[in-house]
Amino acid sequence: MKKASPLFAAFILFCLPGCAQESTPDPELQIGVAVMAAPEEARAGATVYGYTSKGNLTLLRKGANKLICLSDDPNREGFQSVCYHEDLEPFMARGRELKAGGKSSGEIFDIREAEAKAGKLKMPEHPATLHLLEGPGGKYDPESGQVTGAYYRYVVYIPWATAESTGLPTQPTVKGGPWIMDPGTHRAHIMITPPPED
């Protein structure tokens, strides 16, 4: 039987929930997986967060540009790596905090909406983009270094914007076309989901 490579062994620890609880997922592997969601020119300088053996989010690398990336959670079904502009961090961090406190998605929305309106939660003053590489059946392939079964999606946050202020529809008019979600709220954003390649 062929001996497993160190990278493959690290991958197993990274991807299996039971193993992940016993050993810390390899930081370099997590960084590589996290930045897959970022534009190629921004990957080397991005700040990256990953997970400890206990499943806690932790800083893996302090970056030099304005992008923050989160690696795939080994205890989450499917695959998802996320990168976003640093001005979204207060919004993202508050969401993680509320979720950890047991709040539902609806409660998280309402709390952040109230805090943003009160000026307690700082939202971007300009459009700020979130990049996602995700898929419910997505998997990282250690042999190719690529992710299979996952697709890119882009979310451009434009707080308080509306269909009227942007000219965007509230539903996509063509497959993968841009549209505005949660218009008029702190979480107003443009959704762009390119169709999967054949």
Image (cartoon, rainbow, N blue to C red):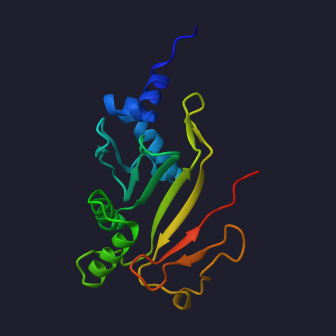
Q: Is residue 94 above or below residue 34?
A: below
Give the percent coordinates (x, y) of residue 146. Answer: 58, 38
Percent of width and height locating residue 82: 45, 54
Residue 18, quarter of picture: top left
Which residue is at the far right?
A: 198
Position of 14 with respect to 152 (left or right) is left
Q: Residue furthest bottom?
A: 164
Observer-nearest residue: 57 or 19?
19
Seen in the picture, residue 127 relative to 139 is either above or below; the reply is below
Position above or below: 75 against 143: below
Question: What is the tally of numbered marks visible in this picture?
Answer: 0
View extreme (top): residue = 1
- Front one among 17 and 47: 17
Determine the residue positioned at 36% across, 78% down: 125
Residue 138: x, y in percent? 58, 44
For image coordinates 57% across by 60% down, the residue present is 153
Rendered location of residue 156, percent (x, y): 49, 70
In the picture as drawn, the residue positioned furthest to the left comes out as 120
Pick the quarter of the image with the N terminus. top right
Residue closer to the observer: 89 or 13: 13
Residue drawn at x 49%, y 45% is 77
Q: Is residue 163 left or right of residue 107?
A: right
Q: Residue at x 48, y 79 (%)?
A: 182
* Residue 4 in view: yes
